[in-house]
Image: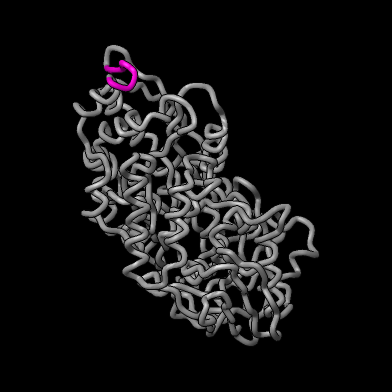
Amino acid sequence: MTAKRLRQLGLGAVLGCAAASPLAAKDIVWARYGDIDTLDPHRATSTLSLQVWSLIYDTLLATDAAGAPVPNLATSWEVSEDGLDYTFHLADGVMCHDGTPLDANDVKYTVDRAFDADNPSVTQASWGPITSAEVVDPLTVKLTLSSPFVAMVPFLADSFSSILCDSNAEQEGFGTTVAIGSGPWKLDSWTKGDRIVLEKNPDYVNHGKLAENPGAPYMDRLIVTTVPEPQTRLAGLKTGAIQIAEPPLDDVPALQESGELNIVIAENTGQNVFWEFALHRAPFDDERVREAVARATDVDTALMLIYGDLSIPEQCPISRGVFGNDQDFCAGHRAQYDPEKAKALLAEAGGWGPDNPLEVNMLVWTGGKRDRLAEVFQAQLAEVGIKANIQMMDIGTMNARVRQENETPEGIGSMDMMTWSWYDPDILYALWHSPGAYRGYTSPELDAMLEKTRVLADPAERKGAVEDVMAYLLDKSIHVPLYTPGWEWVFAVRPEVEGFHVAPFVYPIFNDVKF
């Protein structure tokens, strides 16, 4: 295939990179449907961003194959008897990308920045009630909490807690042109909407990440390019311009059968797709209308039509593989598919029905065939008397729009198909504890229940507290689970690529990749 034809297909970004700096035998090209929001782990929540942060930065802890926290930059730690002091002992010899040593000062800088009074991390609540970070000595740091917080340890294995080298504070453009970490790949450049060019970190030592390679990546560069069109990504995979990408999902069965490309399907993603609503105004301030949406949604049929066996229905507000998930328990509280019941609820709530439909907006973010899935849900809602206007947008825009809808007291009703990935039931605290991730539903009763899930160290007691929260959200149809996806986390890999794998919670690992 000619370079002209590839550019017509939308691969100009990759070829442009090749023209400026020829793609060598030791360059990996990974194509994704969208770009990151920022290089600053304190300023965004999208999975597209998280995946790149995990390459540039490192974390105090890591996760094993089952998703449990294990030592990493912190080789060990102790917790005080009252659960308020955590002392972490850091690995010696870790180097930041600018050649400075990573030590306890960098950890303190990161934590202090996450809790900055004027501009805290967007995931500040997930760090827990940390009141101080103290440098005990260059390789020892102590975090002090105001109250026990059992979810902090797993959080410290997630890229939201990426350790930022304190030399970032002296640089202009942190988050856009500068990102100094200690991870296996260091930033060369980011052209927004086009590509991120990463170079291997020759000083990298793997202390706990899921890679067999103990040192620097085998390949020289990793080029993360934005190629929105699925067929364009597939064309690049077939020509060799791209080595790893999400394929068109409709083509996955044929690709698996042909063996032309290797198909890697991520497991233990922690992903949860759910309906949420603007509850501070009509019509979704009425529990009956929210329940009607839940009962009108035939998730099983929709998934089979769009994804086949790549996604499975989810009954719980937290995903399979996450502590506390119990499909039978949640099914007993979630409103199940029952279109006749949905019609009755709508008629009772406002006289709505197929002949007098209730008009609402349905916000959906782009990618992963969500547009087609939304059309199926739209048709199901129409059958019971809800006219849902689909509005597609990128995830950053949708996050901002959801908050805007929650803060708007008037206007047409708004619901959205939200997605979060998390490793612990503490995601429910981040979403629903006052003031709420998007300023949506909150209540003093729910706040107290959520706070209980954070302090109970006994697993059985904590599981019971998590179940209480899930039952509350499901009984009131505040958080209506839909499915656990495989959609964006299917990777097609060229046959010459060896060693590529995906860690829990959808973190691709490139340290072991060889051609």
> For this view, does 411 lie left or right of residue 268?
right
Q: Residue at x 36, y 49 (%)?
A: 487
Q: In the displayed structure, would residue 99 be above or below residue 223? A: below
Between 497 and 339, the one nearer to me in the picture: 339
Colouring of the image: one colour
Between 244 and 281, the one nearer to me in the picture: 281
Residue 287 coordinates in the image, percent (x, y):
35, 32
Q: Residue at x 22, y 48 (%)?
A: 332
Residue 195 coordinates in the image, percent (x, y):
59, 52
Q: Quadrant of residue 344?
A: top left
Q: Residue at x 57, y 39 (%)?
A: 400
Residue 130 coordinates in the image, percent (x, y):
61, 67
Q: In the displayed structure, would residue 445 be above or below residue 210? A: above
Residue 514 coordinates in the image, percent (x, y):
46, 73
Q: Is residue 161 visible?
A: yes
Q: Is residue 262 visible?
A: no
Residue 461 on the magenta segment:
no
Q: Residue at x 25, y 34 (%)?
A: 295
Between 433 and 245, the one nearer to me in the picture: 433
Q: In the displayed structure, would residue 448 be above or below residue 383? A: below
Residue span colored magenta: 348-353
Q: In the displayed structure, would residue 191 be above or below residue 178? A: above
Between 469 and 231, the one nearer to me in the picture: 469
How many numbered discs sit on the rendered protein? 0
